[in-house]
Amino acid sequence: MGSGIGPGRCFRCGRPLTGDDVGLYKKLFNRGATEFLCLSCTSAHYGISETRARELIDHFRRSGCALFASPGEADGTGPHR
Ligand SMILES: [Zn+2]
Protein backbone atom coordinates (compact mmCIF):
# COMPACT_ATOMS: atom_id res chain seq x y z
CA MET A 1 0.00 0.00 0.00
CA GLY A 2 2.41 2.69 1.15
CA SER A 3 5.75 3.25 -0.48
CA GLY A 4 7.59 2.43 2.72
CA ILE A 5 8.79 5.92 3.54
CA GLY A 6 8.70 6.43 7.29
CA PRO A 7 6.16 4.97 9.68
CA GLY A 8 3.23 6.81 8.06
CA ARG A 9 0.53 8.92 9.64
CA CYS A 10 -1.82 8.72 12.57
CA PHE A 11 -5.00 7.04 11.35
CA ARG A 12 -7.12 9.27 13.55
CA CYS A 13 -5.75 12.78 13.07
CA GLY A 14 -3.34 12.33 10.16
CA ARG A 15 -0.29 13.70 11.93
CA PRO A 16 3.04 12.33 10.64
CA LEU A 17 4.26 9.64 13.01
CA THR A 18 7.62 9.36 14.69
CA GLY A 19 9.30 6.12 15.68
CA ASP A 20 8.31 6.81 19.28
CA ASP A 21 4.65 7.18 18.36
CA VAL A 22 4.73 3.84 16.59
CA GLY A 23 6.70 2.16 19.36
CA LEU A 24 4.32 3.31 22.06
CA TYR A 25 1.31 2.26 20.04
CA LYS A 26 2.74 -1.19 19.45
CA LYS A 27 3.64 -1.50 23.09
CA LEU A 28 0.24 -0.45 24.41
CA PHE A 29 -2.12 -1.74 21.74
CA ASN A 30 -0.75 -4.41 19.50
CA ARG A 31 2.76 -5.30 18.51
CA GLY A 32 1.59 -6.54 15.12
CA ALA A 33 -0.32 -3.37 14.26
CA THR A 34 0.01 -2.01 10.75
CA GLU A 35 -1.53 1.41 11.37
CA PHE A 36 -0.87 3.60 14.35
CA LEU A 37 -1.94 6.52 16.48
CA CYS A 38 0.25 9.52 17.23
CA LEU A 39 1.32 10.31 20.76
CA SER A 40 -1.59 12.72 21.26
CA CYS A 41 -4.24 10.24 20.18
CA THR A 42 -2.67 7.39 22.13
CA SER A 43 -2.60 9.58 25.23
CA ALA A 44 -6.20 10.65 24.72
CA HIS A 45 -7.27 7.04 24.28
CA TYR A 46 -5.74 6.07 27.60
CA GLY A 47 -6.77 9.29 29.35
CA ILE A 48 -3.18 10.23 30.20
CA SER A 49 -1.22 13.38 29.44
CA GLU A 50 1.30 13.55 26.62
CA THR A 51 3.92 14.21 29.24
CA ARG A 52 3.04 10.91 30.89
CA ALA A 53 3.15 9.17 27.52
CA ARG A 54 6.65 10.51 26.91
CA GLU A 55 7.69 9.27 30.32
CA LEU A 56 6.43 5.84 29.35
CA ILE A 57 8.44 5.93 26.13
CA ASP A 58 11.50 6.95 28.10
CA HIS A 59 10.89 4.14 30.57
CA PHE A 60 10.47 1.52 27.83
CA ARG A 61 13.55 2.75 25.98
CA ARG A 62 15.68 2.62 29.10
CA SER A 63 14.48 -0.88 29.86
CA GLY A 64 15.90 -1.86 26.49
CA CYS A 65 12.69 -2.34 24.54
CA ALA A 66 13.58 -2.92 20.91
CA LEU A 67 10.48 -1.01 19.82
CA PHE A 68 12.17 2.20 20.94
CA ALA A 69 15.62 1.78 19.48
CA SER A 70 16.72 5.22 18.44
CA PRO A 71 18.10 5.38 14.88
CA GLY A 72 20.42 8.23 15.81
CA GLU A 73 22.06 6.30 18.61
CA ALA A 74 22.61 3.10 16.65
CA ASP A 75 25.08 4.80 14.36
CA GLY A 76 28.43 3.18 14.85
CA THR A 77 29.21 4.56 18.29
CA GLY A 78 28.46 1.31 20.07
CA PRO A 79 25.50 0.34 22.22
CA HIS A 80 26.58 2.26 25.32
CA ARG A 81 28.72 5.30 24.67
ZN1 LIG B 1 -3.29 11.45 16.10
Image: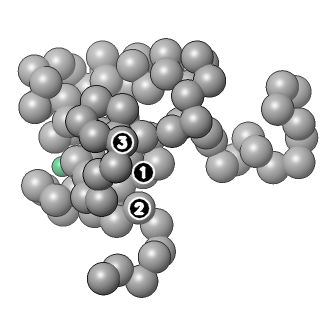
Eyeballing the image, is 63 above or below 57?
above
Secondary structure of the residue carrying tag 2 is: loop
Residue 29 falls left or right of residue 69: left
Q: Residue furthest front?
A: 32
Query: Which mark, by number, is residue 31?
Result: 3
Residue 73 falls left or right of residue 46: right
Disc 2, disc 1: CB below 8 Å? yes
Amino acid under disc 3: Arg
Disc 3, disc 2: CB below 8 Å? no
Eyeballing the image, is 61 above or below 74?
above
Residue 15 falls left or right of residue 60: left
**Residue topped by disc 1:** 18
How far across and how far down the image is residue 75, in percent?
Answer: 81, 49
Q: Disc 3 and disc 2: Cα gap in Å?
A: 14 Å
How far across and how far down the image is residue 43, in percent?
Answer: 19, 29
Does residue 39 appear anywhere in the picture? Answer: no
The mark nearer the N terminus, 3 or 2, is: 2
- Between marks 2 and 1 in the image, the one whose residue lies nearer the viewer: 2
Determine the image quadrant of residue 70: top right
Q: Residue drawn 58% across and 36% down?
A: 66
Does residue 23 appear anywhere in the picture? Answer: yes
Determine the image quadrant of residue 52: top left
Determine the image quadrant of residue 80: top right
Q: Disc 1 and disc 3: Cα gap in Å?
A: 16 Å
Secondary structure of the residue carrying tag 3 is: loop
**Residue topped by disc 2:** 7
Amino acid under disc 2: Pro
